[in-house]
Amino acid sequence: MRRSREPIIWALFGGGGMASALLLPALILILFIAVPLGWVQSAPFEDLQALVRHPLIRLGLFVFISLCWFHWAHRFRYTLYDGLQLSHLNELIAVTTYGIASVGTVVGAYLLWGVG
Amino acid sequence: MPETVTLEVFRYRPEEESEPTFDSFEVPYHAEWMILDALNYIKDDLDGSLSYRWACRMGVCGSCGMLANGRPVLTCTTYLESLLPGPIRIEPLEGFPVIRDLVGDIGDFMGKLAAVKPWLIRDEEKPVEEGEYLQTPSQLDDYKQYSMCINCMLCYSACPIYRLEPDFIGPAAIALAQRYNLDSRDQGAEERMDILSQHDGIWGCTLVGECTEVCPKGVDPAGAIQRYKVSATVDYFKSLLMPRRSL
Amino acid sequence: MNPQYRAYHPRWYRKSVPIFWWLRKRSYAAFIARELTSVFVAYSAIMLVVLVLAMDRGEAAYVGMMDWLATPIVVAAHILVLLVVLFHTITWLNLAPMAIVVKLGDRKLPASAVLMGHYGAWAVCTAIVAWLLIWR
């Protein structure tokens, strides 16, 4: 019997879950709350801009964003199956969620490629 | 301490009704009584038509699983005292079609259990003259926890996925597959992976974790399933990189 | 006698699963809440890209975005996002020992060691992010 290709998306889900678990709290706290409210002084703007323009950072960000998207796609898909009992819409939901994640990945790649 | 306690027992008598009902029984309260003692009292003294399963009455056979106030338990190891004050609601395990009263049809579980081949699989059997398979305490420790399963199916009752996905193999069967996969004497991991790696075989599991919560033997089926997902994923990528199947 | 009853072919009772099965038990509701944190993870990913693009465009765009982020409603929203993402992090890390069992030779690493390893990794990542963004 043919083995399901689920391991690929599960690996993406797991990677995305781990990466987002380790990095998002700090990123959100600092970038979206603390710095805007002035609780902390961020590094000088030129340093921040140089940071986001650095190719390794852009690559890392692209991988991180993409993993977060696929983490959402996989988890949301199963939440729809189990939470709303929509598994009869299996193909539609799978294509939509992973499709969105793929589009998000491509768009993210394009945008981050254009930085700097 | 009260003199009596009320049990509201799920009844399904297909020869009389199409829909289930609840019957109320007042049973004497004793501090040392389990739910099973109360059920036996009902059957002996109040209503002999009550149908339910039980056997060892000491928590090792896995026959007497039922819902007590909505929670899957073994009735032979659950004190009435822990469910005071009444009324105590007794229902059959969820996820299994009810044949009668508190008796469910467990055929689906039995089929899935057999499908994961819960026995030692060897490429070649060692001849008897060569003696027994030796195992260190550390090797025993690898799988011992998963061997504690008594097939009571409380985990199936607790698992929402089992109710929602007909192809999901379920916690106990996967834990038992792991019991053999992790056994140093076993060589059948690859064979089992064909069954388990089907789309809903294990991948339907979303780690709700209730199975581990209700297991009376500390088997931790949720852990077994997550570990299996990791090893199945690693194996999948290995087989992509190396054309020969490897485990 | 139930007219629908057929001797030797009795109808078994199959309970249907209600749509809101997950509202009936606290642990199920907590599970669904945990799963829905993924929506906030996806949102955070989008916002990060938006912020990076603003930084790239120049200081004016960056300051403009910071000002927008500082408005009360947006602050409140992002505090919610932070709480939800923290819930994701803590539940995720707490489940790590379930999936990862490490054996060193003959000894199994205790689950607490795996757990502490993960929390340690979280602390290190947080420190690196803080170092990159704040103190340089």
Image: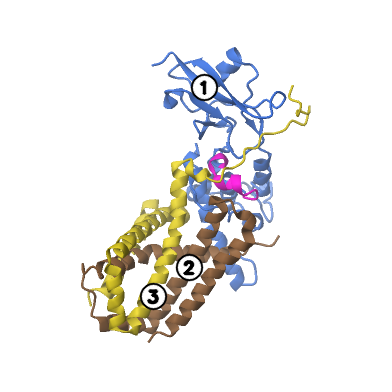
Circle 2 packing at 10 Å, graded few (<14), some (14-19), many (20+), is many
In percent of width and height, residue B217 lies at: 50, 38
Q: Is residue B243 above or below residue B118?
A: below
Badge 1: chain ID: B
On the image, the x and y values in percent for residue C116 come to 34, 56
Structural distance between the alpha carbons of marks 1 and 2: 50 Å
Q: Quadrant of residue B109?
A: top right
Q: Amino acid at mark 2?
A: Trp
The one of C56 and C120 positioned closer to us in this rendering: C56
Q: Measured along the vertical axis of the image, is residue A92 above or below residue B101?
A: below
Which kind of residue does numbered mark 1 sit on? Leu
* Residue closest to the far bottom: A116
Q: Colour of chain B?
A: blue
- Look at mark 1 in the image and give the residue it sits on: B7
Q: What residue do we see at 36% from left, 84% from top?
A: A53
Q: Nearer the viewer, residue A22 or C34?
A: C34
Percent from the top left, x then y, of residue C46? Answer: 42, 71
Quadrant position of the N terminus of chain C in the picture: top right
Chain C shade in the render: yellow
State which mark lies toward you, 2 or 3. 3
The residue where tag 3 is placed is C50
- Chain identifier, brown in the render: A
| Callout 1–callout 2 Cβ contact below 8 Å | no
Which secondary structure, mark 2? Answer: helix
Chain ID at mark 2:
A
Q: Is residue B35 visible?
A: yes
User: What kind of element bears circle 1?
Assistant: strand
Q: CA distance from mark 2 to mark 3?
A: 15 Å
The chain under label 3 reads C
Magenta range = B156-168
Q: Quadrant of residue B195?
A: bottom right
Q: Is residue B188 visible?
A: no
